[in-house]
Image (cartoon, rainbow, N blue to C red):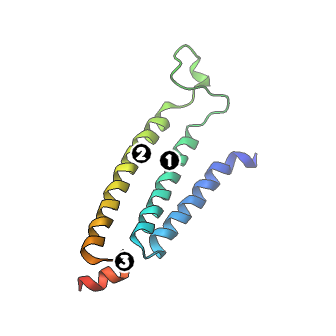
Amino acid sequence: MMLLNLPYITVAILIAMGIYAMVYKRNLIKIVIGLSIVESAVNLFLVSLGYRRGGIAPIYTSAPSTYMVLPTPQALTLTSIVIGVATTAMLLSFCMVIYRNYGTLDSRKIRRLRE
């Protein structure tokens, strides 16, 4: 019974790790990595919500609907993965521009240079 909660415990741990990285780290790359960890935790949460014991993939249309895994969380997860990749690429390109302009990725130094 306890193993059924393992995905949700993992989601909570990953979200805590990602938020810690986004709040307490100074390097912009580490902040982006923290956001990526939170995105992965959300994807795991969506997949865990759609899990059904003994379920089969929803692509088989001849199977009874009571044994199918829910297709909506799978579609949401695929959409979330695409959005996450695009967001990560955009944030990393921002990091490159910031490094070119300021010569550092330390968020505290960038704030001081702005003033």
The residue beneath circle 3 is 107
Element under disc 3: helix
Q: In the displayed structure, would residue 24 be above or below residue 29?
A: below
> Left or right of 39: which side holds 108?
left
Q: Residue at x 36, y 77 (%)?
A: 107
Q: Which of marks 3 and 1 is in front?
A: 3
Point out the residue furthest to the right here.
Answer: 1
Amino acid found under the numbered disc labelled 1: Asn
Amino acid found under the numbered disc labelled 2: Ser
Residue 6: percent from left, percent from top: 67, 50
The front one of 10 and 49 is 10
Point out the residue furthest to the top here.
Answer: 62
Quarter of the picture holding the N terminus = top right
Element under disc 1: helix
> Left or right of 80: which side holds 64?
right
Q: In the displayed structure, would residue 19 be above or below residue 115?
A: above
In which quadrant of the rendered view does residue 10 lie? bottom right
How busy is the neighbourhood of tag 3: few (under 14 within 10 Å), some, or many (20 plus)? Answer: some
Amino acid found under the numbered disc labelled 3: Ser
Residue 66: percent from left, percent from top: 60, 23
The residue beneath circle 2 is 80
Mark toward the start of the polypeptide (3 vs 1): 1
Q: Which residue is drawn at 47% across and 63% down?
A: 34
The residue beneath circle 1 is 43
